[in-house]
């Protein structure tokens, strides 16, 4: 089984999609008319330094993700069993499923970005190496109840959202507990109560659109379960103020069978998050979703002569390691369980940025990733300043 994943805001970078725009002139022309500017010029050259502004970031990522999906269909002549997107990427998942056209999806994203950019000023931060319960306890104990959880990205990576003053205060308390805390370069408190005014206005706007039948199951950010046709409008509106349940979404998909995950669009942020989730103990089984019959290539317009997209490392709020190879099947259940336990134990005790001693190196090194399953049978970890993984068995905290 196969799941295609689409990234959201934070994955953008100057030059993204350069190999795609000329291959899909019809979609690019439509995008330019809807947006009122050249989407290719924005993504490839960004002459006015607007790409990192929310009202421009969201349409840009949507278009690049959508063109990447079309190219994938051209290259493989197959459709996935499931689609999922992280925040903004969920619009690409819905477009890929046939629920919304490319043009209407872009209109929605344009409006969403404009509304979110005008919301009250806020801030966000990534908390690395703490559980949800630990984060809640620290916030409550220090009177920071105005902070919400925006993203449950991995078992050890959570993003919080709130007023700028509260996010700044929280840094002190997490640092005191020796928990890594990374303020993010965002202009608003996304996926929090502070987006309420944007959500209300966007809900009204959503009602203008008609959503057609979902031909591929789409996993919802807010409840980690497949979209129901009748709930599309409500889900998209609520997504603005609700947490992105990425961990539970991936766990749900893992329980549907032998699932392969492939990230389309920009970068490998989601690939790394999935690897971190897969490294943990398997979650309890859930009821499998009965996928509807897939429509084949007719689900989306394609271009018969699309080039191959180059995978490009992106700038992300959190330093990302090289993408590990997909895990292969383990030789035995016990071996897999032991490896997962080893990785989970390391990640719980040693957040990214831990100073370590490595066999064969005299100087201390610093980790730049969580421990991951690599090549299906090895536990590896990446170090700052090095391109390539280190065997976890050769690494000890300094």
Image: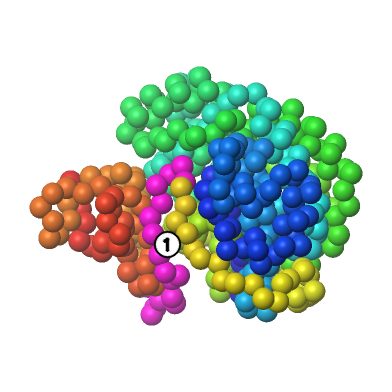
Is residue 386 left or right of 276 when viewed as pictured? left
Any part of residue 375 in sight:
yes
Up-down: is 296 above or below 249? below
Residue at image coords 54%, 29%: 123
* Image quadrant in which the N terminus is located: bottom right
Is residue 285 left or right of 222 when viewed as pictured? left
The residue positioned farthest toward the left in the image shown: 362
Any part of residue 8 in sight:
no
Q: Quadrant of residue 386?
A: bottom left
- Residue 69 falls inside the magenta stretch: no
Residue closer to the observer: 69 or 19: 19
Q: Position of residue 97 (x, y in %)?
A: 75, 63
Colouring convention used in this rendered image of the protein: rainbow
Magenta: main secondary structure equals loop
Q: Position of residue 303 (x, y in %)?
A: 72, 72
Residue closer to the observer: 109 or 21: 21
Residue at image coords 58%, 58%: 17
Q: Position of residue 266 (x, y in %)?
A: 55, 56
Q: Position of residue 344 (x, y in %)?
A: 37, 55
Question: Which SS class for mark 1?
Answer: loop
Residue for badge 1: 323
Residue at image coords 40%, 47%: 319
Residue closer to the observer: 265 or 371: 265
Q: How many C-alpha atoms fall within 10 Å of the one at disc 1: few (<14), some, or many (≥20)?
A: some
Report the magenta residues as a range: 316-336
Residue at image coords 56%, 71%: 308
Up-down: is 393 above or below 234? below
Residue closer to the observer: 220 or 336: 220
Q: How many badges with numbers are in the image?
A: 1
């Amino acid at each position: 089984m196969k799941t295609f994943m689409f990234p959201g805001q934070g994955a953008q970078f100057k030059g993204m999609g350069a190999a795609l725009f000329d291959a899909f002139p019809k979609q690019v022309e439509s995008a330019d008319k809807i947006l009122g500017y050249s989407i290719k010029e924005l993504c490839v050259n960004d002459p006015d330094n607007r790409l990192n502004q929310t009202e421009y970031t969201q349409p840009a990522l949507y278009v690049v993700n959508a063109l990447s999906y079309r190219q994938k269909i051209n290259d493989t002549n197959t459709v996935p069993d499931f689609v999922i997107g992280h925040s903004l990427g969920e619009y690409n998942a819905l477009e890929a499923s046939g629920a919304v056209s490319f043009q209407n999806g872009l209109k929605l994203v344009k409006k969403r970005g404009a509304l979110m950019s005008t919301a009250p000023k806020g801030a966000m931060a990534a908390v690395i190496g703490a559980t949800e319960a630990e984060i809640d306890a620290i916030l409550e104990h220090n009177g920071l109840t105005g902070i919400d959880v925006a993203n449950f990205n991995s078992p050890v990576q959570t993003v919080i959202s709130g007023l700028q003053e509260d996010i700044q205060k929280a840094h002190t308390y997490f640092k005191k507990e020796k928990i890594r805390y990374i303020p993010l370069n965002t202009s608003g408190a996304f996926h929090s109560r502070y987006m309420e005014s944007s959500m209300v206005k966007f809900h009204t706007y959503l009602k203008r659109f008609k959503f057609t039948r979902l031909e591929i199951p789409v996993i919802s950010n807010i409840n980690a379960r497949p979209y129901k046709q009748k709930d599309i409008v409500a889900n998209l509106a609520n997504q603005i103020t609700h947490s992105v349940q990425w961990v539970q979404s991936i766990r749900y998909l893992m329980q549907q069978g032998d699932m392969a995950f492939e990230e389309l669009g920009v970068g490998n942020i989601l690939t790394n998050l999935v690897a971190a989730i897969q490294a943990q103990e398997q979650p309890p089984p859930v009821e499998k979703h009965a996928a509807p019959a897939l429509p084949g290539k007719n689900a989306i317009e394609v271009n018969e002569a699309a080039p191959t997209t180059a995978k490009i490392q992106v700038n992300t709020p959190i330093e990302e390691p090289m993408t590990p190879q997909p895990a292969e099947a383990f030789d035995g259940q016990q071996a897999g369980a032991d490896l997962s336990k080893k990785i989970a134990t390391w990640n719980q005790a040693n957040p990214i940025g831990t100073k370590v001693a490595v066999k064969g190196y005299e100087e201390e090194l610093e980790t730049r990733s969580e421990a991951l399953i690599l090549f299906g049978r090895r536990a590896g970890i990446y170090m700052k300043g090095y391109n390539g993984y280190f065997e976890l068995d050769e690494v000890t905290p300094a």
